[in-house]
Image (cartoon, rainbow, N blue to C red):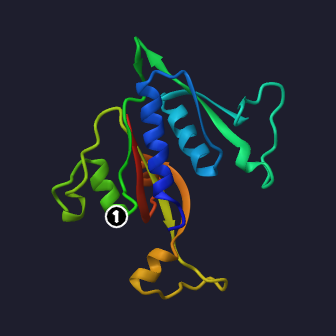
Amino acid sequence: MGMSLIKLGDLCAHMQNVTRTKNVITKIPYTKLNLIITYKLLMNGFISSIQKGSVLGPDVDKTVTVTPDNISTRRLWIGLKYRNNQSSLSKMSLISKPSLPIRLTLPLLEKYAKNDLQSDPRLSGLEPIKPGEMVLVREILDNIDSKGKNKNFTLSDLYKNENYGEVMELHEAIAKRVQRSILLIKAH
């Protein structure tokens, strides 16, 4: 799979663990996907800050450009947010599992957003969305060859060769009319 649900699971577990221990700041590996997800957490008020840095700490004087030579030492430093000794991020978990990625079409995404989970058996295993919860999805792009024509794949080949687009919130995916997506993370 092009994107690693295992690494996303590690991110979710790490974020939950640091909020349980009441850490004020934590570091996670610097990846484009981690940057996008933490940015969505920041915009929804679950964390207080994101700062580039190294394994030693956040960049203070100047920001270091990330290159292939230094990517292994680069980290994102995340400021955690608390109010009345309670974390703003109480739970962060994967919706899709590495062994069972949940791919939804636009009509199924709309039903999921409305918590209409009983109307389709493909949604029956999902938990309803609670107020204040953020759901992130990732667009699955069509498989198109260099000449602009759809490639023909068997079902197993299709899953191996999926191309992934933008990570976005559930309501954003519906507004953009994303035709196919994979469910990623739930946070509240």
Please give the name of the residue rendered at 27% of the width and 48% of the height, measured from the top-left corner: 114
Please give the name of the residue rendered at 29% of the width and 52% of the height, measured from the top-left corner: 112
Instruction: Give coordinates of residue 105: x percent, y percent.
Output: 36, 65
Please give the name of the residue rendered at 58% of the width and 46% of the height, measured from the top-left corner: 34
Instruction: Give coordinates of residue 144: x percent, y percent.
Output: 57, 80
Q: Is residue 96 above or below residue 132?
A: below
Q: Is residue 2 above or below residue 62?
A: below
Q: Is residue 149 left or right of residue 159?
A: right
Is the residue marked by circle 1 packed among few (<14), some (14-19), or many (20+) residues within 10 Å?
A: few
Residue closest to the far top? 84
Q: Nearer the viewer, residue 171 or 139?
A: 139
Residue indicated by mark 1 = 100
Q: Is residue 33 left or right of residue 146?
A: left
Which secondary structure, mark 1? loop
Q: Is residue 71 left or right of residue 83?
A: right
Q: Amino acid at mark 1?
A: Leu
Instruction: Give coordinates of residue 18: x percent, y percent.
Output: 47, 29
Task: Determine which quarter of the picture holds residue 62.
Answer: top right
Instruction: Give coordinates of residue 30: x percent, y percent.
Output: 65, 45
